Amino acid sequence: MGGMGVYLPLDPDWPRFIDDHPELTVINVSEMVWAPQTEPKSNFAHTVTPAHAAYAFYTSGSTGLPKGCIIEHGAFVASTLERVKALGRNRSSRMLQATTYTFDPAMEDILTTLPVGGCVCVPSKQEYMNNLSGAICKYKASTLNITPSFVRSLRPEQVPSLKTLILGGEKMNDRILETWAGAVSLLNAYGLMECCIKSTINRVSADADPRNIGYPAGCSIWLTRPHDHDTLAAIGTVGEILIQGPNLAREYLNRPELTAQSFPQNLRWASQAGLGSDTRFYKTGDLARFNPDGSICLLGRKDNQVKIHGQRIELGEIDYHLRQSFPAEAEAIAGVATGVLALLEDPAQVHQLQTSAVERLSRVLPTYMVPSVFLPIQSFLYFSNSKTSRRGMCEQATNMFLETILKKLGRVGHETHDNSSWSADALALRQLWATALCLDTKMIGVEDNFSCLGGDSLAAIELARLCRSQNVDLTVDDIMRCPTILTHLEDKHDRRANGGTAQTAPFALLEKSTDISKLCEEVSKPCQVDVGSPTPGKGVAHSFSPEEINEPGASAQLADVIATFVE
């Protein structure tokens, strides 16, 4: 960014986005050779201006094509100056980086902390997935910025160093207020990628309305009639949030029509408000109303955009790819309950086509957008204007008993209702699963898959926390690797039989599609050794070849690296 480059984090699931960037330099850390002697000896020669692009993020799009959003240096800096005050960020702040770098709050954590002299603490993925409270204590973190869904794995008494908890991306609830408002400085934040992440911030108390997102920070908020942005909404009535100020994005990359539609100018009321005709606004699609004190009450969406664990999702994008995955006569739409559902108008071949549909969807959508349940229903519901009633059908689906849905999909094990032969360990695990998944224990069998019972990454984190509290050795990785109670117990038995270490079959850690003979040949040539069983490793594990080690000074550099990792 300091050298006039643009930072663009890409999820490994989204390689097709590179097509939008013909001049993109893709850095694959695992293939880089450690070479400190090539580092520049001086600062960048380029001069960055406020109009230069700083970073870009992608978000879901309603037409099947994700939107890439460009943020300029000036926009982020101007809005950050105000947000830093509202967030209480200062030199003593210790921000725990617990957000993936492809999620825009990660930029917020870094670029509002380092400029004021604060410290960004970066735990390993294993630390924040399996023991978030332990990571907070280990790094003495004072500030945490996560979604309300994620905070359920924490308790105030577990994290005495935590002073500020910032929640955003989803609606806060009364339970969070009761638990956290008296223990920390609790902030309810609202914002979007197109407006530098956070646009309003509210410091809340235990008796606050969880829908209150507070006041603007570094921008102005206007409410217009939901379907007429040229008319302001009357005070106290519901309107669409329009954001105006220096924090707006430049554009959607290579999407001029969408940019013009989402960032309108020349609004009829702008001149009456003392604004120039060229003033830009961003139409959020969010509905709200002003409270008597001028704060903002967030009420919902006017379109089909939803959020799952803070990630913005256009259901239209999933609809588009669902239609490509099923026959033309099979109507299909996406919905949201506890996760993403695919609702299909009862095609007879839905179960036969589901596997191939998931495979195709996994190639074109990030993991969190791939439906976890494919639910055939007798007939779609329609409005009088012939448009599909997505909400009505989701309600119809969620009103079905979960057990009925699971049986219909063939996902309930045959031992579900018979626990007479269960061991004490199995019964204890089933109780923990039931608590984490919010299910009755009767609905969980020893061969039922955690994901098929509705378990996602957050449920896995909660299950790992519950297991830790009961001195049960089970991590998030273990849950994903051994997704049934039976496979976990078998894995536990194998570990005990092998002195506490599970034995891994040769080549078992490689992707199924890996050409093993070709890989062995590629590895054996530069290393001049016979290959037993290649194992995926970190970048430093395969950054040196024999030729590089023999270069002048390389031995000392390698010794320094080894000393870093070996005590």
Image (spheres, rainbow, N blue to C red):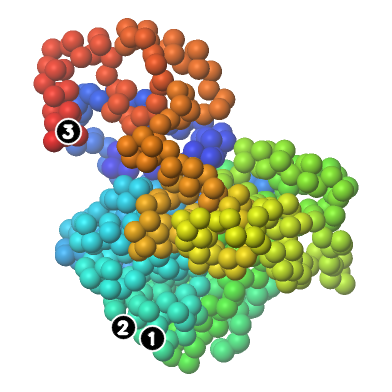
Q: Is residue 50 left or right of residue 396?
A: left
Disc ID at residue 470: none
Query: Is 458 rendered above or below residue 19?
Result: below
* Residue 31 position in % (x across, y down): 37, 25
Give me the C-alpha separation between circle 3 and circle 2: 43 Å
Q: Are marks 2 and 1 in contact (CB under 8 Å)?
A: yes
Which sits earlier in the primary sequence, circle 3 or circle 2? Answer: 2
- Percent across and percent down for residue 427 are 51, 60
- Residue at point 51%, 85% (across, down): 290
Q: Quadrant of residue 283?
A: bottom right
Q: Secondary structure at mark 2?
A: loop
What is the secondary structure assignment of the residue under circle 1?
loop
Q: Amino acid at mark 1?
A: Ala
Query: In which quadrant will I find the C terminus?
Result: top left
Q: Residues within 10 Å of mark 2 (few under 14, many from 20)?
A: few
Query: What's the distance in space between the residues labelled 2 and 1, CA to CA?
Result: 7 Å
Residue 195 screen position, x and y as percent: 45, 62
Residue drawn at x 50%, y 64% is 431
Instruction: Look at label 3 and name its amino acid.
Output: Val
Label 3: which residue? 566
Rendered image quadrant of residue 2: top left
Q: Which three-letter amino acid code belongs to the residue tagged 2?
A: Gly
Tag on residue 206? 1
| Residue farthest to the front, as pictured | 420
Residue at mark 2: 182
The answer to whether residue 334 is seen in the rendering is no
